[in-house]
Amino acid sequence: MEQATFRLINTRKLRLYLVISAGVLVLLGLYLASRYNYLLFHSLAEIFSIVVAFGIFVVAWNSRRFLDNSYFLLLGIAYLFVGAIDLAHTLAYPGMNIFPGYETNEAAQLWIVARYVEGLSLLVAPLFLSLGRKLRIYLVLVSYALATSLLLTSIFYWNIFPQAFVEGVGLTLFKKVSEYLVCLILLVAVGLLFQKRGKFDKGVLRLLIASIVATITSELTFTFYVDPYGLPNLIGHFLKIVSFYLIYKAVIETGLVAPYNVLFRNLKQSEDQYRDLYEEAPNAYISVGVDGHIKMANRYAVKLLGYPLDELVGRPFYELYADTASGKTKAQKLFQRFLAGEEIRDEELEMRRADGSKMWISLSVRPILDEKGRVVASRSMVIDTTKYKEMDQLKDEFIGLVSHELRSPLTVITGTVNTVLTEGARLSPEETRQLLQDAALEAGALSHLLGNLLELSRVQANRLFLYTEAISVQNIIQDTVERIKPQSLPHQFVINIPSNLPPAYADPLRLERILYNLLQNAVKYSPQGGEIRVSGKLDEGHLVIGVHDQGIGISHSDQAKLFGPFQRLEESRLGGAGGVGLGLLVCRRLVEAHGGRIWVESEPGRGSAFFFTLPLSKG
């Protein structure tokens, strides 16, 4: 049995390696195609996404009579029209010469229409999971057809759709704001998916969220191009390919094929195999009788709960749960549902081990019936989810913080632009300039947050590449301080750098990000009018740069976890300081990538000093 399991694991690994290798070869081939003829690359990339979109529709449509998931059915219909609009975008692309008289603007308009349809569909689809009846598919189909027809007519016939691209200038404000708005819609869609996560297989949910994240990243890259054949366009289409591949895996392969494989395999299990699995399973299995006492427990249940088997068997089940609403109270209610013959799946409860410690578990209960259909016992599976619970709480907090940090500048930018557009005639030049300065400041904050997220994603994917050179740190420090000053006019900035410091060997853009993050932290935690000082010195063949503030200081317990992911000081939460807890983690990753180290020296109430080192020579 162990050999069979080992062979199965090796087969899965081999399959994964083959898929990754094939994906790399495909992307490499597309890249080479782009070098040979960008129009060929664009057509191949779009055709791939169009085929996947139509494939999702075909599978969902032909499965509609027995598909009990309105989410996948709605997505299937939506992607039919997304694929149709992407097809029109492909044919209208500059150089295709399919639609005479149409240029880059029409292709960009079709692109943004397709992304709005896709984003809004992904946003709305989770809401249909709570429907008590099946989706009215023909009404949905007609609605999508009507909306798509109106949008295409507004571009090709009425010519009333907002302009998205100006030749020789680049993207219009409408196109850029639309890309950010689509990203915001997709972020909300991720949040709704997470709320409805109980309706999905965990693997499918991960693929769906990964696909949406890839789409968001793709949209952000498309805000930077001024040439339809430029690098941002190339990267954006690569990310689109990844996004559509992931949704293919989620909807077509994993969501529809895998469940049936599992079903038919389980139908053939023998009683002896079940007993072996029961005893050796990596999850806790417990059988409870209708009298509420434990009848059986496997080895993992004994290990998880900390009771000897002879003390566990015969014990009332409710004694295993914590004295909380999520413990005994909920367990008693679930027991009544079990007695009524109801199958219980993935209920979250709080248990108590033999040593008194508490843990979160996921409980699934299947009633065992006698020949007359009466409940005689349960087959209960207990999974320790304490770590996942903590991770979920961390992810929920992170998603909430990121959503807030993205929404705040977007709200200011949108409000400012609307004010200038609608009230421009009544505003003085000084007022208009101030509004645009506010919008630029918020756009800079948004760009910096997205930059931090992208840096972390590169680190996670082992794709962080440094472009190091001999640089003068004085100039970079001065430029970074000038950038941060508009965010904190009351603070006093002091640069204390010896004029004879030798050049450091670093990536100038990454060094600027490190300094900006540290200065931004100093601004957040320093009192109004306080001094923020940047220092530099030589130490054992390295350049040591420090950022000093006069803030609240940091306790020794907080210092130990300060450079971990999503860490924010307790004082910052209570005091309302912004941020998502990524800045110091990004600093640490970037400093370590340079071969340096970063640390903090601080005492509560006496301010803090963050130091990091840079090499003075290559390597």
Image (cartoon, rainbow, N blue to C red):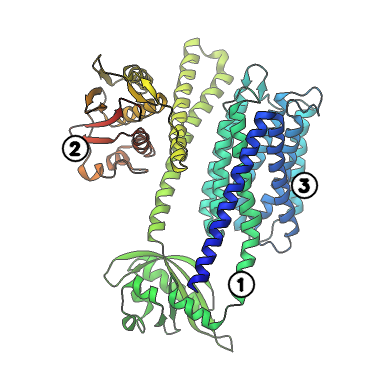
In the depicted structure, whether residue 285 falls above or below residue 35:
below
Q: CA distance from mark 1 to mark 2?
A: 61 Å
Disc nearest the viewer among 1 and 2: 1
Q: Nearer the viewer, residue 62 or 95?
A: 95
SS at mark 2 in the image: loop
Q: Where is mark 1, residue-wise?
A: 265
- Seen at 20% across and 35% down, the residue is 602
Given residues 201 and 280, the one toward you in this image is 280
Q: Quadrant of the C terminus?
A: top left
Residue tagged 3: 142
Amino acid type, label 3: Val
Residue flagged by tag 1: what amino acid is it? Arg
Q: Residue 9's spot in the image, x, y percent?
A: 52, 63
Spot occupied by residue 470 in the image (x, y as percentages of width and height): 36, 21
The total of numbered circles placed on residues is: 3
> Gap in Å between the C-alphas at discs 1 and 3?
40 Å
**Extreme top residue here?**
429
- The answer to whether residue 401 is left or right of residue 600 is right
SS category of the residue bearing label 3: helix
Query: In this orientation, does residue 6 appear?
Result: yes
Q: Which residue is mark 2?
A: 604
Q: Is residue 247 left or right of residue 360?
A: right
- At label 2, which amino acid type do we have? Pro
Q: Are marks 1 and 3 in contact (CB under 8 Å)?
A: no
Image: 51 above or below 523: below
Please tell me which residue lies in front, 37 or 455: 37
Instruction: State which tag comes first along the sequence, 1 or 3.
Output: 3
